[in-house]
Image (cartoon, rainbow, N blue to C red):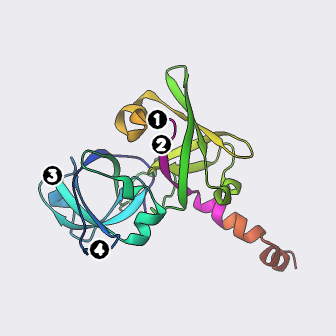
Amino acid sequence: MFTGIITDLGRITAVGNPVPGAADRRFRIATKFPMAEVALGASIACNGCCLTVTQKGADWFDVDVSGESVSKTTLGAWGVGTKVNLERALKAGDELGGHIVSGHVDGVAEVTSIRDDGASKRYTIRPPQALAKYVAAKGSVTLDGVSLTVNEVDATSFGVNIIPHTQAETTFGGLRQGDRLNMEIDVLARYVARLLEGGVAAQIRG
């Protein structure tokens, strides 16, 4: 599990294909994490995707990504030089600075506009239609691994405010209109929606 608080901005240094002819990908990611403390098999959230460390060095680690994950996320567009938001998995006793994030991407959203809002920037995001119902004003959402508070919502989009610190320490500082983002809905919204579905809600009322 994660909290959506980015602790390093990594960079893709190599892209490979572990199975020739398949859609799988292998990425090498440069990092400032103390990799001597990170075990092989550990989980690291990379732009919001929970990935397993398969090889490592003093300042890098490798991850393998299945064709299924490539098709359902933005990872297929990663190339050498791509910057990546990184977060190590939670340990017992860690501070929960954002919200509970699983690292399982629900869909891909799109940046439809960016405008200045004081020192911050306001991003308008268009989620996949199937995920729009899970987004609520003042609720939480994860975009490319970053835990964010939703400012406003309409029928097809929602807005988030990105402060200067987040712009500088994550990939948000380099985003442009039309860019695509890995989106994970709030786990609480997922379960509330499930409970409110007809059959389950009827059982609770009964």
Can you tell which of label 1 and label 4 is closer to the viewer?
4
- Judge left or right: residue 50 versus residue 152: left
Taking depth in this image into account, of 16 and 204 the one nearest to the observer is 16
For mark 1, does the 10 Å Cα neighbourhood hold few (<14), some (14 to 19), or many (20 or more) residues?
A: some
Residue 46 visible in rendering: no
Can you tell which of label 4 and label 2 is closer to the viewer?
4
Identify the element where label 4 is drawn.
loop
Can you tell which of label 2 and label 3 is closer to the viewer?
2
Residue on which the image places disc 1: 176
Task: Tell me the amino acid under the disc marked 1.
Answer: Arg
- Residue 21 — which label? 4
Pointers 3 and 4 in contact (C-beta within 8 Å): no
Pointers 2 and 1 in contact (C-beta within 8 Å): yes
Q: Which residues are magenta?
A: 176-190
For mark 4, does the 10 Å Cα neighbourhood hold few (<14), some (14 to 19), or many (20 or more) residues?
A: few
Task: Tell me the amino acid under the disc marked 2.
Answer: Asp
* Distance between the alpha carbons at the discs numbered 2 and 1: 6 Å
Residue on which the image places disc 3: 59
Residue on which the image places disc 2: 179
Can you tell which of label 3 and label 4 is closer to the viewer?
4
Task: Tell me the amino acid under the disc marked 3.
Answer: Asp
Identify the element where label 3 is drawn.
loop
* Distance between the alpha carbons at the discs numbered 2 and 3: 28 Å
Relative height, residue 195 to residue 76 (above, below)? below
